[in-house]
Image (cartoon, rainbow, N blue to C red):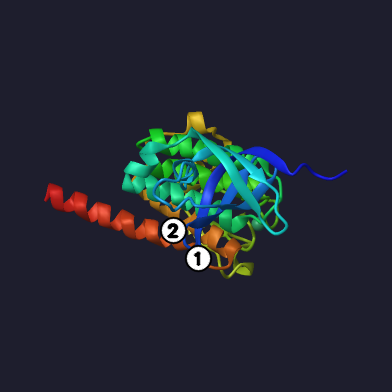
């Protein structure tokens, strides 16, 4: 049986690339088809009816026509525009970072509905929360889980032994926490504080609606580094937008400091 020529899907717009004079190639993350590439014709023309519905970090309903090499967007309607993610620099950078991670970690046409739901829930969270960093750490941990890289936090990932309260390590190559005895076998390890480990365990069991609040800045920055190193290890090269987000975060902190000085 041949597949229908036209089809419709919900989609999260995670990447866009210019094509020719007025077109774009879009990466769409969908619930049932995984990541798909599609051409949006004429969307860079000022009077395009579709362009607003196909911006990055938008949840849209998209109609497509199958092509021999790539499918073409024939119609689209916005479900959620996520305006706070487009008007606020830090929220926007955070959302683009989540989109880039999903794009980098996925291949085309591999269904992963939990990942679609996670990204959608994270964009809603980022649009509404003032605690962007906690929302991002939640996203990173659960992204890893939906991709099959759930870090082991309850037992030593190497010997399966019970972890002590302090003196544990995190090993990106091992995929989790390592006890003191196993540590020498993992040269890439780095220490994980008891507070950071507790927070990771809490985040791993949380839902977007019930994220922990009041995580100390010291623990949050330890988690930025820990999860960043694990993600980089998995991607085998650094995530470009993570570096950009770091730069932006430093600038914002500097601005905040100069306003209060
Ligand atoms: Zn061990």
Q: Going by the picture, which residue comes out furthest to the top? A: 209
| Closer to us: 119 or 151 | 119
Pick whichever, 2 or 125, lies toward us.
2
Q: Which residue is mark 1?
A: 238
**Percent x, y of residue 185:** 64, 68
Q: Residue at x 77, y 41 (%)?
A: 4
Residue that badge 2 annotates: 242
Residue lying furthest right: 1
Q: Please tell me the numbered disc located at residue 82.
A: none
Q: Secondary structure at mark 1?
A: loop
Q: Residues within 10 Å of mark 1 (few under 14, many from 20)?
A: some
Secondary structure of residue under mark 2: helix
Q: Which residue is found at the position 66% from the left and 54% from the top?
A: 157
Residue 123 or 158: which is nearer the viewer? Answer: 123
**Horizontal and vertical percent position of residue 149:** 65, 52
Residue at 63% x, 57% y is 175
95 sits to left or right of 146 = left
Classify residue 250 as left or right of residue 206. left
């Amino acid at each position: 049986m041949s597949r229908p020529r036209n089809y419709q899907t919900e989609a999260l717009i995670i990447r866009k690339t210019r094509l020719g004079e007025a077109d774009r190639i879009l990466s769409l993350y969908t619930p049932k088809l995984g990541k798909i590439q599609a051409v949006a014709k004429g969307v860079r023309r000022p009077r395009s009816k579709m362009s607003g519905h196909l911006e990055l970090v938008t949840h849209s309903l998209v109609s497509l026509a199958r092509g021999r090499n790539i499918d073409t967007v024939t119609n689209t309607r916005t479900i959620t525009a996520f305006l706070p993610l487009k008007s606020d620099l830090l929220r926007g950078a955070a959302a683009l970072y989540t989109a880039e991670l999903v794009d980098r970690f996925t291949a085309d046409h591999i269904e992963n509905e939990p990942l679609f739901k996670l990204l959608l829930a994270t964009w809603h969270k980022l649009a509404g929360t003032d605690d962007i960093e906690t929302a991002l750490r939640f996203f990173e941990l659960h992204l890893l889980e939906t991709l099959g890289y759930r870090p082991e936090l309850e037992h030593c990932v190497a010997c399966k032994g019970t972890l002590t309260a302090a003196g544990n390590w995190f090993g990106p190559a091992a995929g989790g926490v390592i006890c003191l005895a196993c540590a020498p076998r993992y040269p890439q390890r780095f220490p994980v504080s008891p507070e950071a480990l507790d927070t990771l365990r809490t985040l791993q069991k949380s839902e977007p609606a019930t994220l922990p609040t009041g995580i100390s800045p010291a623990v949050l920055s330890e988690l930025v580094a820990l999860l960043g190193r694990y993600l980089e290890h998995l991607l085998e090269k650094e995530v470009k937008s993570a570096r950009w987000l770091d730069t932006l975060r430093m600038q914002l902190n500097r601005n905040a400091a100069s306003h209060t000085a």
